[in-house]
Image: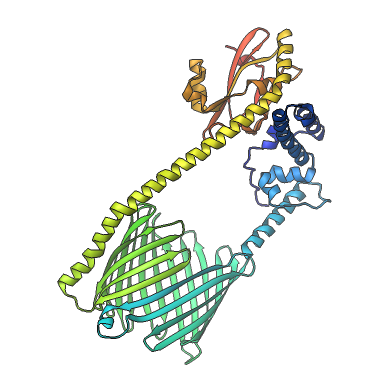
Amino acid sequence: MASTPEPEDGRELYALLHLSPDASDEEIRRAYRQFAQIYHPDKYQDPQMKEVATENFQRIRDAYEILSDENKRQIYDIYGMEGLNSGLELGPKLTKPEEIREQLERLRRRKEEEKFLVHARPNGSIIANFSVPQYLDGDGIMKGMGMSSEVELPVSKQNTVIVGGNLVVNGSAGTGAASTVLRHQLSSVSHIDFMATAGLRSVIGMQTFRQISPHSTATSGLAVSLRDGSINLSNAWTRQLSENAVGNIQLVLGDDSSISVGWQKKDEKSTATGEIKFGTNFFGASAHYIHRFSSKSHARIAGRVGSTALDFEIGGGRQVSEFSTVRMMYNIGIQGVSWRFELHRAGQKLIIPVLLSTDLNALFVTSAFAIPSTLYFLLQTYVVKPYYLKREKQKTLEKMEGLSTQLTEARKAAKKAQKLLEPVSNRKKNRQLENNGLVITKALYGNHKKIKESSELNEINDDVASQVFDVTIPLNFLVTEADQLKLHEGIKKSGIMGFYDPCPGDPKLLLVEYTFHGRKYKVMVDDYEALLIPQDIHQF
């Protein structure tokens, strides 16, 4: 059976009721009654105090309802609040922990499958070809247009149907095709595709893919033409050459037999790709290099040479929103000089090639490159960059303000919770003082580094105060009649009633100074570490 994930909330419900994860039903009821006596709204007449009590009483009651229910507690222990909120439910006849875990795993897998099945993944492209020379000759500026679309439709955990089609129009002539692929997942490392295409070329075929080793994959395909019965066989092998480099070889046998060898290297800043291809009637080589200046912008250089192509391309792109990227490319080759504009959004592409001239005049070639480059530089320097810097600064400020507001509200809520604990906490403290028992004199919870600084300096300055929180009141409340204070291992301390997290994401410490039988003690523990006091080793 697969291992189950640990809950990500630090077992907050156990912290809230000050319980061990192994607490019995009676201990859970006793803890609930203890806190309910403090926070029951009927005890308070003041409207503000009543509001604070109501809010905290609801938290306590919710925690009790979950931990006192065997099935809900099992779900919470395994998956945390996410498991409960996702709607996982158990049958009433399950009693053994192993049965419950197995049932939870089945339910979780079922919900993942349901989530998986509702998502179709479409992608497509539109290409609009423009020609300035054609327009200057008196014809329309539109040279041709092409559209393609493809949608992946998961029909089960192992099966996916891919439906696609394309349409190409050049002048008064046009072609189109429609295709369907059924992909069946044979295992975690292999699948098989069954394909059918109707249109100018009607083809049926199949293709298999397999991960043959941790660093190698292989693909084999068979395609049969329904028009003339010709058969094409293909084989491809891919190998991880290094941490960042991949090599591949492809062999095709049929009407258009060919062999190609390719290579790709990709790291954080750049991507380089090259390929050499030889066929029965052609040969060619291509390469391109992409350099990423940042997570939002990149430059691209590409070139092709061979029996049917000779061109060079340079340009770049920029991410303009979370899902959208724009690109502009400059191309010079045997067909002339052209620009290409691209808009990529999610899985959709709009591509607009514009043929500027079929004449490779040196002045025109230089101008066609220099004009858009200069415009881009000016736009980037005086419009785009200042705009993005301003927007990023604003987003950072808003994020900081939002976090600051959340922390301020959490701090206020913790202080309000402490205010209701304070009367009982003070009574316990006074009783302990009378009996020369356990008294918490100082308790601070917060940033690991700041807690150590405040411990060494024996003071709290403004910088420290913003990242630590005084929890003396709640800890005195938790001292038992047996002159002990116990905090359980594996439970995040910010979940304890009257605590909060003053520095989310940072390592935290709890500093406790206390007296017992007239002696002074001090101890520091990590956020999830157990604490049991008094102990002689804490004496100073």
Residue 19, position in %: x, y?
72, 31
Q: Residue furthest right?
A: 93
Q: Is residue 13 visible?
A: yes
Residue 39, position in %: x, y?
75, 29
On screen, 247 above or below 47?
below
Q: Quadrant of residue 140?
A: bottom left
Residue shown at 25% from the left, 82% from the top? 136
Q: Is residue 19 visible?
A: no
On screen, 384 above or below 239?
above
On screen, 156 above or below 99?
below
Residue 101, position in %: x, y?
73, 49
Query: Does 529 sit left or right of 308 as displayed?
Result: right
Query: Does 393 sit left or right of 91 as displayed?
Result: left
Q: Residue furthest bottom?
A: 228
Query: Does 99 sit left or right of 522 as displayed?
Result: right
Residue shown at 35% from the left, 77% from the top? 129
Out of 511 and 158, give the one closest to the viewer. Answer: 511
Out of 151 and 528, give the one closest to the viewer. Answer: 151
On screen, 335 above or below 80?
below
Q: Quadrant of residue 328?
A: bottom left
Out of 116 and 238, give the one closest to the viewer. Answer: 116
The C terminus appears in which quarter of the rendering? top right
Out of 539 and 146, give the one closest to the viewer. Answer: 146
